[in-house]
Image (cartoon, rainbow, N blue to C red):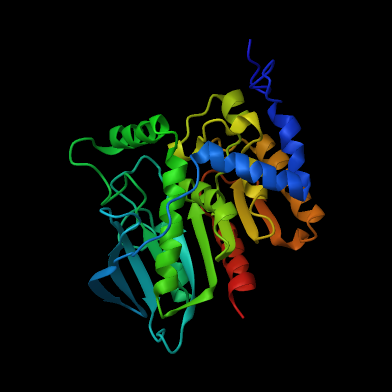
Amino acid sequence: MMHPDRPLEGSPILDGPYFRDMIFEPAGREFLRQRLLECLGGPWPEGGDLRPQLEQIIQKDGYRIERVTFEPVPGERIPALVLVPDGVSATTPAPAVAVWHQHNGEWHLGKSEPAGLAGNPMHHTGVSLVREGYVVVCPDALCFEERQDEHLRGGDYERFEFLRYVVSGKCMAWRNILDMRRTVDYICTRPDVDAQRIGCYGHSMGSTFTWLVGPWEDRLRCLVGNCCLPTYRGIHKHKLLHCFPNFIPGWYRYADTPEIVALCCPKPVHLNFGAKDEGSPIEEVREAVARIARVYHLAGVPENFSYFIEEDAGHVLTPAMWTHVQQSFAKHLRR
């Protein structure tokens, strides 16, 4: 019988903990990186013409919101909201932050929540960042807000897309990473952005997006996630249901989700957690961050990985957590 902590007991492929330890050596990290790419679904297509379109400008107090769209692949468009501080231009470019929105079972919401136009004020994080002088790009994830289907709605469409990619030998995370990389492509085309100073932030599913894209996107100079690092060990132990990007077919043969974060090394990563967050059981989180920290230590850049656990918090963004977000971007994106 399969044991939850030894998913391939008796398999000719050695079990996860064996491969997990390989992350501590450079050659092992490259081996795992290649296995992760295979599990995700293989290389992404070469970036083509984004064909960006500016569709609307909304002036706010101290910044403007641009509604734009661009093509991640031919025939599809990603709608995004770009928040630009007053005074930022091609002659006075600013650092930029991509904000990946949360899931929360709210498929009608995507980019509009971090852009401050809808949803929970707690997560109007794009507004907070633009007021600090960053250009902020908030795209819709597949299946959310403007990227829904006219026939299948909400969770039904998300499940359909996940399964459609799985039977094609890929997964939802593969597509999400493609869209994030194309979003970074778009950010780099903007003359009002300093392309050497780009970071990303996300809460919940947005945090998952952050550590998913990290191993594949060197143009992101700082990665910050809030409240989401569910390990497969914890998911199996507590029988947790999570959003589809967390599930990468075959990866648990080799390692777990903390090793994906570790593959971001040496890029700066900061993660926030609430000790009472049932979606990321804290006992697994504490073990996970210790494993990640060890990788950064052995790579000679211990200062590039940090985390904060708020003992009385759950699955939220608290003022203390946000302070850590601000400090991380100030440290790595400001000159």
Location of residue 264 by image quarter:
bottom right
Q: Position of residue 284 (x, y in %)?
A: 67, 36
Quarter containing the C terminus: bottom right
Q: Residue at x 43, y 89 (%)?
A: 91
Q: Is residue 33 left or right of residue 19?
A: left
Judged from this view, the residue extending furthest toward the left is: 150
Q: Position of residue 81 (x, y in %)?
A: 33, 65
> In this view of the protein, which residue sits in the foreground, 58 or 222?
222
Q: Residue at x 56, y 50 (%)?
A: 211
Q: Is residue 270 visible?
A: yes
Q: Position of residue 187 (x, y in %)?
A: 42, 69
Q: Position of residue 199 (x, y in %)?
A: 53, 65
Q: Is residue 275 visible?
A: no
Q: Residue at x 46, y 42 (%)?
A: 173
The answer to whether 38 is drawn above or below residue 322 in the figure is above
Location of residue 84 by image quarter:
bottom left
Q: Is residue 232 left or right of residue 14?
A: left
The answer to whether 132 is drawn above or below residue 81 in the figure is below
The answer to whether 24 is drawn above or below residue 180 in the figure is above
> In this view of the protein, which residue sits in the foreground, 229 or 37?
37
> In this view of the protein, which residue sits in the foreground, 207 or 182?
182
Judged from this view, the residue extending furthest toward the bottom is: 91
Q: Is residue 42 left or right of residue 127?
A: right
Judged from this view, the residue extending furthest toward the top is: 1
Quarter containing the N terminus: top right
